[in-house]
């Protein structure tokens, strides 16, 4: 991978150290996404699919963070391809997640409920396998050329002020969170899921700044990760309730839904 064009991306009068740091940060995000794509193409297991989707989100976040200083055309094309890759894996990831949730649920419910869930496990297992055999979920488009085009476009460009851009991005993320809170306080499933996505974006922005040397943000990153995890567990319960309720309800499945709602 060509890297020379990433190294001297700086603003006149700006310390070279910060410019190099930001260039390396962008390059690491790109390299990570390429590595995870190779894992999916080679193995396609649930962990690889999840890691690639996370890598594309992180790549999109750093591109937005550095957006004012990036070449517009290559920047937009790489973002579009990263988003397209993540969406192409969505159906496979959903099947993997639901299968994992149902299997975990079976380990902590009564024998009667375990028997009722067995057909769900079998069906989800077949669905995940079919998606992989058919290639619908694991047909991954390439992005190396777009990464290289972005790197080539950086030559001679000014890098953004890390502190100023960090303030802009975090202010935008906080505003978005504040707007999401009133709906989330209702406890409605969709609103809580939207809040979780907003927290995830906020955390990714914090991580960019932390990785750039602002280590005092580590506590805020940990707090955002913890809250995201709690909302994730709630989302898992909501997904399980919705999944069970989509099927014809029996006395056993109704009692299972009641248990899940109590857990929620």
Image (cartoon, rainbow, N blue to C red):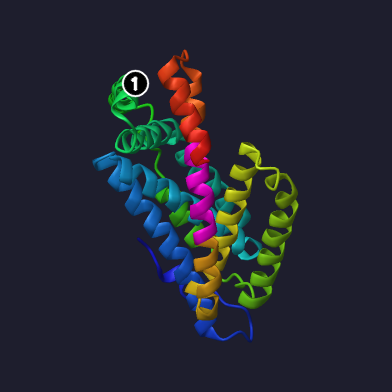
Q: From the image, which quarter does the N terminus lie in?
A: bottom left
Within the magenta stretch, is there residue 139?
no
- Residue that appears at 31% across and 19% down: 119
Drawn side of residue 133 relative to residue 83, left or right:
left
The number of numbered badges drawn on the structure is 1
- Residue 77: x, y in percent? 55, 46
Residue 217 against residue 39 in the figure, above or below: below
Along the line of sight, the residue nearer the viewer: 173 or 208 = 173
Residue 126 against residue 153 in the figure, above or below: above
- Residue that appears at 70% across and 43% down: 186
Along the line of sight, the residue nearer the viewer: 118 or 48 = 118
- Residue 90: x, y in percent? 45, 35
- Element under label 1? helix
- Residue 159: x, y in percent? 60, 72
Along the line of sight, the residue nearer the viewer: 154 or 78 = 78
Residue 146 against residue 44 in the figure, above or below: below
Along the line of sight, the residue nearer the viewer: 205 or 219 = 219
- Residue 73: x, y in percent? 60, 51
Q: Residues within 10 Å of mark 1 (few under 14, many from 20)?
A: some
Region of the chain picked out in magenta, as a range: 226-237
Residue 154 found in image quarter: bottom right
Drawn side of residue 250 relative to residue 120, left or right:
right
> What residue is disc 1 on?
116
């Amino acid at each position: 991978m060509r890297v020379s064009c990433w190294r001297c991306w700086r603003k006149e009068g700006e310390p070279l150290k910060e410019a190099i740091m930001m260039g390396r940060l962008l390059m690491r995000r790109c390299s990570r996404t390429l590595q995870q794509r190779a894992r999916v193409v080679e193995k396609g297991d649930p962990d690889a699919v999840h890691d690639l989707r996370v890598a594309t989100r992180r790549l999109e976040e750093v591109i937005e963070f550095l957006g004012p200083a990036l070449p517009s055309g290559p920047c937009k094309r790489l973002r579009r391809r990263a988003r397209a890759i993540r969406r192409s894996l969505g159906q496979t990831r959903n099947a993997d997640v639901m299968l994992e949730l149902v299997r975990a649920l079976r380990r902590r419910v009564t024998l009667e409920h375990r028997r009722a869930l067995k057909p769900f496990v079998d069906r989800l297992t077949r669905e995940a396998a079919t998606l992989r055999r058919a290639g619908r979920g694991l047909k991954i488009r390439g992005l190396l050329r777009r990464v290289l085009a972005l790197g080539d476009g950086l030559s001679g460009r000014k890098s953004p002020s890390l502190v100023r851009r960090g303030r802009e991005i975090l202010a935008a993320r906080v505003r978005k969170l504040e707007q999401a809170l009133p709906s989330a306080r209702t406890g409605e499933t969709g609103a809580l899921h939207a809040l979780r996505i907003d927290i995830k974006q906020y955390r990714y922005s914090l991580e960019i700044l932390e990785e750039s040397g602002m280590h005092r943000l580590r506590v805020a990153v940990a707090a955002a990760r913890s809250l995201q995890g709690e909302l994730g567990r709630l989302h898992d319960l909501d997904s399980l309730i919705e999944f069970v309720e989509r099927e014809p309800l029996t006395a056993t499945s109704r009692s299972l839904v009641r248990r899940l709602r109590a857990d929620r």
